[in-house]
Image (cartoon, rainbow, N blue to C red):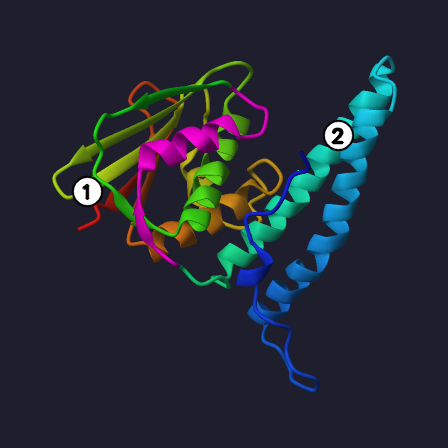
Amino acid sequence: MPASSDLPAARVAAAPKANAQPDATALVQNLAHELRQPMSTIDSIAYYLSIVLPRENPRLSGQLQKLQEQIQQINGILDDTVYYLGAVPRYPRPIDLNDLVRRCVDRAPVGAPVRMNLAEKLPAVRLDREQARHFFRSVISVFRRLAPGAEPVTVSTSATGAVVQFEVYAAGASLGRSERQDMWEPFAAALPPSAGLSMASAKRIAEAHGAVMDLEPGESGGLRLTVTFPAAT
């Protein structure tokens, strides 16, 4: 089915009143909302064409797939921008972190394979489900893009005391100290296109939920991100 944004229309603020001067956040929020409809229409057309057009033409099928991937990328950039600006209210509730991570891995864009190592019986964490979904999709997607070739990315969860940890590790990724610092810059030139914005928006989401992010090299090389969430009480 056609891809859809993480941001439902009901959660996007109404357009500013006539003659009012919106601030940058409201402007971006409403601009993203206005772009959803044409993007959704284009995606629906591409999906319809993928069904009705002959599949014997691999070149045509490939172009349609690229079009749908570009639409997903644009929707992702819009979501990243809105979340980075903190333009969406939060509605946290207890969530099963393992279940959410599994769903995000299953729906992640094509990239390096993912190996999951999820702990059993994790305490729940209080998260806004839609923002948390965007967070995990963004982080996992960026690490899959950073991993070279078919080198797997490992996703893990664990719990210690009153905290729950999520960890993603790309064994083959190699970033210098300055490049690791740039991981949180929205338009970092050293990262794949839009990866900096994805990580910057993910950091804003994590911090808004009381989580702490720690990015460092792995013990045997590679790149490791550890996110520590307070357990729900």
Residue type (three-letter) at the residue carrying disc 1:
Val
* CB atoms of marks 1 and 2 within 8 Å: no
Residue at which label 1 appears: 163
Q: What's the residue at 21%, 48% (across, down)?
A: 232
Q: What's the residue at 40%, 23% (across, down)?
A: 222
Q: Nearer the viewer, residue 41 or 108?
A: 41
Label 2 secondary element = helix
Q: What's the residue at 51%, 61% (across, down)?
A: 85
Q: Point out residue 40 in the picture as x, y percentages from the top left corner.
A: 72, 47
Farthest residue in the left direction? Answer: 161
Query: Magenta segment, which residues?
Result: 91-112
Position of 25 with respect to 228 (left or right) is right
Q: Is residue 118 above or below residue 31?
A: above
Q: What's the residue at 79%, 44% (across, down)?
A: 42
Quadrant (top left, top right, bottom left, bottom right) of the N terminus: top right
Residue at which label 2 appears: 66
Crowding near the residue tagged with mark 2, few <14, some 14–19, many ≥20 C-alpha atoms within 10 Å: few
Crowding near the residue tagged with mark 1, few <14, some 14–19, many ≥20 C-alpha atoms within 10 Å: some
Q: Is residue 105 found inside the magenta-colored segment of the image?
A: yes
Residue type (three-letter) at the residue carrying disc 2:
Lys
Position of 77 with respect to 200 (left or right) is right
